[in-house]
Image: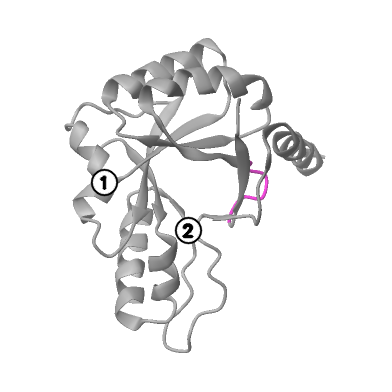
């Protein structure tokens, strides 16, 4: 896999969950099956893998699902897409899938709540600038908390930056996953994740 780095995400609720993100420029949905073939041998100890996709369509999700199934990939694959890509999905196009799901990326104050609740979305990731602004700006903080509450009530997984302490007037947001600092090569990062999983199971 050329020029691929992995970022690890830490769960704030389940320490044994191992989540990695393939950190490269968003790829075409048609390229996802090949990328999965390249990294499949290294995903044995991961719970979830995130891959940003540009202009994904239902047929791309189906192809990714068939590939993951044929390769016996145990990790759940989350394709990260933006609100614009949701226009390609009609209600009924996406159904719950044990292999592949959708992550709504770049969620901010302008994201329609209907996008958060659209069928097929199983996780959301907040825009970093918006999340940081929300820690110091009460109106933005209220918007973020409202979206977080909606997502959690709907059973969606939430990802966001490690924002640190907030102002006196705004409580800190709690995301299900926050990123670890830095990037690593695919082989090294996934090897370390596997070791971490082994330690946590002892």
Residue found at the far top of this picture: 70
Circle 1 SS class: helix
Residue 114 drawn in magenta: no
Q: Examine the rendered structure and indicate whether residue 194 appears above or below residue 82.
A: above
User: Residue 37, image x and y in percent?
Assistant: 56, 17
User: In the rendering, which numbered label is found on residue 62?
Assistant: none
Residue at the spot x=45%, y=71% of the render?
Answer: 132
Please provide the residue range marked out in magenta: 13-18
Residue at the spot x=57%, y=15% of the render?
Answer: 72
Say which quarter of the image contains residue 129.
bottom left
Q: Which of 126 and 198 lies nearest the eye of the viewer? A: 126
Looking at the figure, which quarter contains the C terminus?
Answer: top right
Chief secondary structure of the magenta portion: loop
Answer few, some or many: residues within 10 Å of disc 2's Cα (few below 14, many 20 plus, some between 14 and 19): many
Residue 166 is at least partly visible in this image: yes
Say which quarter of the image contains residue 178.
bottom right
Looking at the figure, which quarter contains the N terminus?
Answer: top right
User: In the rendering, which numbered label is found on residue 160?
Assistant: 2
Circle 2 SS class: loop
Q: Is residue 181 left or right of residue 139?
A: right
Q: Which of 172 and 31 lies nearest the eye of the viewer? A: 31
User: Residue 184, image x and y in percent?
Assistant: 69, 43
Answer few, some or many: residues within 10 Å of disc 1's Cα (few below 14, many 20 plus, some between 14 and 19): some
Q: Is residue 11 left or right of residue 151?
A: right
- Mark 1 vs mark 2: give the one in front: 1
Which residue does the numbered mark 1 point to in the structure image?
A: 83
Residue at the spot x=17%, y=32% of the render?
Answer: 91
Q: Which of 103 and 188 lies nearest the eye of the viewer? A: 188
User: Residue 34, image x and y in percent?
Assistant: 50, 17
Q: State how far apart marks 1 and 2 are (Cα).
A: 17 Å
């Amino acid at each position: 896999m050329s020029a691929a780095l992995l970022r690890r995400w830490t769960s704030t609720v389940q320490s044994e969950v191992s989540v990695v993100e393939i950190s490269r420029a968003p790829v075409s949905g048609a390229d996802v099956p090949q990328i999965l073939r390249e990294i499949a041998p290294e995903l044995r100890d991961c719970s979830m893998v995130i891959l940003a996709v540009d202009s994904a369509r239902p047929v791309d999700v189906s192809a990714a699902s068939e590939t993951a199934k044929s390769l016996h990939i145990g990790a759940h694959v989350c394709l990260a897409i933006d609100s614009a890509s949701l226009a390609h999905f009609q209600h009924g196009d996406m159904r719950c899938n044990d292999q592949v799901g959708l992550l709504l990326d770049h969620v901010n104050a302008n994201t329609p709540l209907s996008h958060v609740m659209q069928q097929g979305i199983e996780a959301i990731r907040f825009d970093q600038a918006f999340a940081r602004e929300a820690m110091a700006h009460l109106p933005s903080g209220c918007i973020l908390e409202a979206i977080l509450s909606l997502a959690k009530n709907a059973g969606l997984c939430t990802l966001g930056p490690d924002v640190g302490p907030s102002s006196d007037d705004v409580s800190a947001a709690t995301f299900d996953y926050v990123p670890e600092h830095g990037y690593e090569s695919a082989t090294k990062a996934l090897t370390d994740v596997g070791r971490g999983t082994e330690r946590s199971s002892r």
